[in-house]
Image (cartoon, helix red, strand yellow):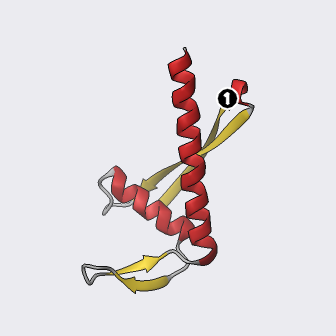
Amino acid sequence: MKDQIFCYFDHDDLVDDGIVWNKAVFVVAREDIQTQKEADEYVARWLYIDGAEALGADGKPFNKMVGKSKDAAIHHLLIDTLYEGLKLKKEMAS
C-alpha cells in the first residue's frame, strides 16, 4: 500500500457556549506506523513542519517548527485546551 493520509471532517455544536467546534480526523496508512502516537507525530509533521532541522538534547536530528508552522501548532494547542475545558464544564453541569 502506498503511504496515504485520509482526512474526515466533523463538528460539535456547543450551543450553550455559542461555539461550533470543527474537527478533522486523520487516518494514516503507512506500514511503519503502528501506534496512535506515531500517527499523531506523522500528521503534525505533514501539517506543520517548515523543514528547519535542529539537534535535540539527545543529539538526534529533528524537524523544528518555525514561523507560521510554530504559530499554527501553538494556536491549535490553545484552542484544543479551551474546547476540552468547555466540554468538561458541560459534562459536570449535566
Give the residue at x 54% y 14%.
94
Residue 81 at what x, y percent from top left?
53, 45
Which of the 4 image quarters holds residue 71?
A: bottom right
Q: Is residue 51 above or below residue 30?
A: below
Total label count?
1
Which of the 4 image quarters holds residue 34?
A: bottom left
Q: Mark 1 points at which residue?
A: 14
Give the residue at x 61% y 77%.
67
Residue 77 at what x, y percent from top left?
54, 54
Q: Callout 1, which amino acid?
A: Leu
As rendered, which of 22 and 74 lies closer to the eye? 74
Q: In this view, does 35 lie above or below 66?
A: above
Q: Is residue 47 above or below residue 16?
A: below
* Residue located farthest toward the right when viewing the structure as drawn: 18
Left or right, 70 with reference to 28: right
Q: In this view, does 29 lie above or below 70?
A: above
The answer to whether any part of residue 3 appears in the image is no
As rendered, which of 12 and 46 lies closer to the eye? 12
Residue 31 at what x, y percent from top left?
32, 61
The answer to whether any part of residue 93 appears in the image is yes
Left or right, 70 with reference to 3: right
Residue 37 at what x, y percent from top left?
35, 54
Q: For the residue carrying disc 1, how many other residues have a C-alpha within 10 Å: few (<14), some (14-19), or many (20+)?
A: some
Left or right, 58 with reference to 29: left
Question: Where, quadrant-wise, is the N terminus in this rendering?
Answer: bottom left
Secondary structure of the residue carrying tag 1 is strand
Give the residue at x 44% y 55%.
28
* Residue located farthest toward the left when viewing the structure as drawn: 58
